[in-house]
Amino acid sequence: MRQSAQLGNNRTGLMHAGARGDEMVAAPREFPPSSPGDAQAIAAVRVAYAQESDGLGETPPPASLVGMAKATVSAATGGQPTLFMDKLGERLAFEHAGARLYEALVSKFRAYGSFDGGPSGEELLHILTEEYEHADILTTAIKELGGDPTVLTPAANLAANISAGLPQVLSDPRTNLLQSLEAIVVAELADNECWTALAQLAEQEGQDELAQQFREAIGHERDHLLKVRRWIAAGQGREVSDDTGDDADEDSDEEYTFAPDSPADAEGFAISDEERAEQGEAGKSGKRRSGRRRPGA
């Protein structure tokens, strides 16, 4: 299957319909709506439904006495154990969904093959394996905290609704590998953002070991995102860049140097040698210049 769009007989546009298009536009004028009203009536119904709703659900209490005790201690010391469990459930549901997306992507690869600069089967299977591992980490964490990993928490419910269109793209037999990667990058962007938030929540709960595991998962996810971006750029014939452009100074053409052991900031981004020097100067002057950063993975 061809990866890029080709010229062909696309009849979805009105401009190519000629007189039939004019007739389509004329029909609503001849046959107006059968009842009065406008979009404001729809908005009013939405407001009424929202006001009567009970929300997406609740996070259940810990299933064990030990879990309840941990949650009580966490809340007493300023933690947010209910929010943390809600977000753990969200990540677990998303990792399960992400694994299914990559399973479908592997099927696309087997059906259509790759393209110049695109992914290999081994690379896709490697990412899929890491998605499985992330799900295992989350399942274990929820159990150790006294929770139930089979519960659909409110945040998990929300995440499922947000990403509902992605499986449709991957399972559609008409979509090729490149188009499927464009759906995958949406999931990877969300994955990177949510893992960062989860690691911060773990630290607030005093779960330092879990936070470290989540930081490692962030490294994996940043690597996944970088690879998918490279593959999409190659498939579109664009210049491939490793730079994410985050916090870039638009007026600066400076290059930044990264070592394999460069430290990472609180968001998981690598800190360049130049930025470390700038931070040292900032400590003296109270001012820091924004630089361009790359993923820490």
Image (spheres, grey):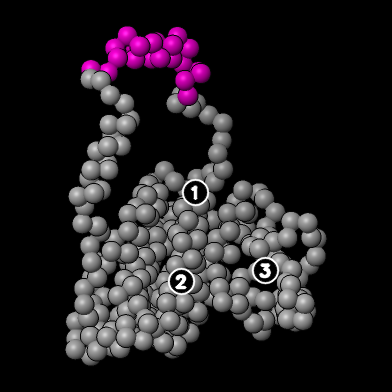
Which of disc 3 and disc 1 is earlier in sequence?
Answer: 1
Callout 3 touching callout 2 (CB < 8 Å):
no
Residue position for label 1: 179
Residue nearest the observer in this picture, 231 or 189? 189
Displayed quadrant of residue 107: bottom left
Q: Is residue 11 visible?
A: yes
Residue 86: quarter of image: bottom left
Instruction: Answer left or right for 5 relative to 148.
Output: right
Q: Nearer the viewer, mark 1 or mark 2?
A: 2
- Indicate the secondary structure of the residue bearing disc 3: loop
Residue at label 2? 197
Left or right: residue 232 versus residue 133 is: right
Instruction: Kindly tell me whether residue 109 is visible in this rendering.
Output: no
| CA separation in Å, label 1 and label 3 | 28 Å
First in residue order: circle 3 vs circle 2: 2
Q: Which residue is mark 3?
A: 293
Task: Residue 43: say if magenta.
Answer: no
Amino acid type assigned to the residue bearing label 2 in the image: Ala
Q: Is residue 169 left or right of residue 16?
A: left
Query: Which range is magenta?
Result: 13-34
Vertical arrangement, residue 205 with respect to residue 94, above or below? below
Distance from label 1 to label 2 (Cα)?
Answer: 29 Å
In the rendered image, residue 31 lying in the magenta stretch gets the answer yes
